[in-house]
Amino acid sequence: MAISKNASSNKTKRWPVSIPAFAAIFLAIGYYLGSQLELVKLLNNKSSSSSVGFESPQAISSMLGNRVTNRNTNSTGNDNNDANIFRLHPSIELTESRELYRELVHPPVRKLVERGEVKNCPLTQVKPYFDILKSINEDPLYYEDDNKKNSNQTCPVVFLFYFEGGSKIADTFFDYYSNIKTNRCLNFIVSSRWIDEPGTKEMAKAHGFHIVGKHQHRQDKTISTTLTEIKKQYGDDVLVSVNDLDHLLVWFDHSGKPHRYSSYTDMVRLYAYELLTTRGCSDQNVMEKYVVPCTCLMEKNEKYISTVEDGVIWSEYGVNNRFHPTGNFYLDRSFAEKGEGDSEYVYSIGTVFANLRKYEEDIITHHKIGWRSKKIFSRARMAGVIHARSDNMIQSLTKYQHFLFHSMQKNGFRDQHATVADAMGCSVVDTHGILRNEKTCRKVKEFANILSIGHQKLACLNAGYSEEHCMGDFSCCLTY
C-alpha cells in the first residue's frame, strides 16, 4: 500500500530496511535524547516529575505523599476562594471551580428534574436516572462517603480504569483524583499479566481503591468480563465509564475550557444529566468530549507554532493535531474526506459511558463500549476527558520505546515486514494522510511516533526557537 506523497518510492528504495532491523538505530536515538534529560529537569524546575522511567507500582506508591500536597494546595485566588489549581504541566492548569459548576450545571439539572420527563421517552426507561438526580437534589451528600449514613449506597456511576504496568501515569492518577472521597466507585481493572506483579495490589489498596472484575490476558477480554461482573452486581441501569489510567475526567464550561470535578456527586450529576439530555432515551452510548493539552501546534504536521505565550490550547483530535493510527479516538464526522479508507470506523468511535442495557459482551476495547450493539451513539456537551500527557519530548520518546521494546508481541496489528519508509510516511503526514493509509499506519504506530518527535523538534528549530525550548516544550499534540 502506498503511504502518501511524503513516503515516495524513492524513500522506499533508500530505506528498504525492515523495522525490527532498524530498532538499534532508535535505541541510539533514545540514548542521545536521554542524555539531555538533565536539561529538561532544569527547564521544568521540578526534579521529581521530570525524571524519565517506568518504575514499579511499589516504587510509585512510595513517592506519592509529597506530590499530592504539592499540587493541590495552591489557590487560584478566585473571588469565591474555593477553586484549586491542579498543575498537569508547568504550562497547564486545571481549575476546580465549584461556583462555576453550580452556576452552569445546577440550574438545568433542577429544571429537568422539575419537568420529570424526556420528550418522546417512556418514563420507565429514564426513571432510574431521574431518581439519581432527585436523590442528589434532596441531599447533596447522598452518595458521598463522608456522609456516614449513606456510605453504603450503591454507586450510580461506576468509573473503571484499566491499569497496565508500572508507569508514572499512576502518579498523576492518584494525585488528580485525591479530592474524590467516594473512591469506592472508582475502580481499577487489571489484566492477568499485571495482577500478580509486585506492588500492583498494594498500590491500589494504599490509596483506598479496589481492583475489580476478572483478570484476562487481553485488555478487551479483561474489560468485557469485568463489565459482566458489574452488570451482575449493579444491574442493567448502572452507568459505566471505562477509561485508560491516563484519562482525567473533566467537565467543560460553555467556552470549552476543562475543569476538575470537586466531588463524586458532581460527576454523577453531570453524567446522569448528559444521558438524559442526549438522544436515545438513555439506551445509548454517550461520547464524551475528548481533548489533549497542547502548548504548540503543527499546522498540517508541517509548520511549528508555539503557543506558550498565548496559553494552552485544548485540542480535539482532528482539529489541529494528528490522529491516532490505531483509531482509538473519535473525530468529528465533519472532518471526514472522501477516500479515507476506514473513515466510517474511525469517525464513529470515542471515549464513552453507557448503561449496561443490551450489553452482550461484544466490547472490543474500552473506547468502544457496546460495539456492534443496537445502542445509539450521541455526544456529551459538558462531560469529558483530558489525556494526561508526559511533560516533554524525552518522556514521550521513552513511552514509545517502552511499548516498542517491551510490548512488541502484544500489538496484534504490527507487521514485522513493515519498512522504515512506511513509518516515515505515517510520521510526516497530517490527520487525513494517516486515515487514507490507516491499516499501514497501525502497523508502525510506535516507530511513526518516534520519528514524529524528531520531525517536530526539527520544525521547532527551523521556526527559530532555541534548543532548550524545543526539548522542554510539550510534544505537539503527538498521538499516544
Image: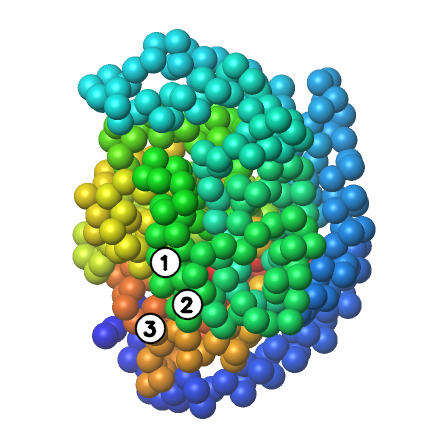
Q: Position of residue 268 (x, y in %)?
A: 49, 31
Q: Residues within 10 Å of mark 3 (few under 14, many from 20)?
A: some
Whichever of callouts 3 and 1 sits on the residue coming sooner in the sequence is 1
Asked which secondary structure carries label 3, the reply is loop
The amino acid beneath tag 2 is Gln
| Residue 225 circle label | 1
Q: Quadrant of the N terminus?
A: bottom left
10 Å crowding of disc 2: few (<14), some (14-19), many (20+): many
Residue 430 in the image, given as x and y percentages of width and height = 38, 57
Residue at the spot of label 2: 216
Query: Residue at point 26% right, 61% down?
Result: 436
* CB under 8 Å between discs 2 and 1: yes
Mark 3, residue position = 413
Please give left or right for residue 386 compared with residue 316 in the image. Answer: right
Which residue is pictured at 53% across the width and 60% down the height? 163
Left/right placement of residue 120 relative to residue 435 reads left
Q: Nearer the viewer, residue 378 or 16?
A: 378
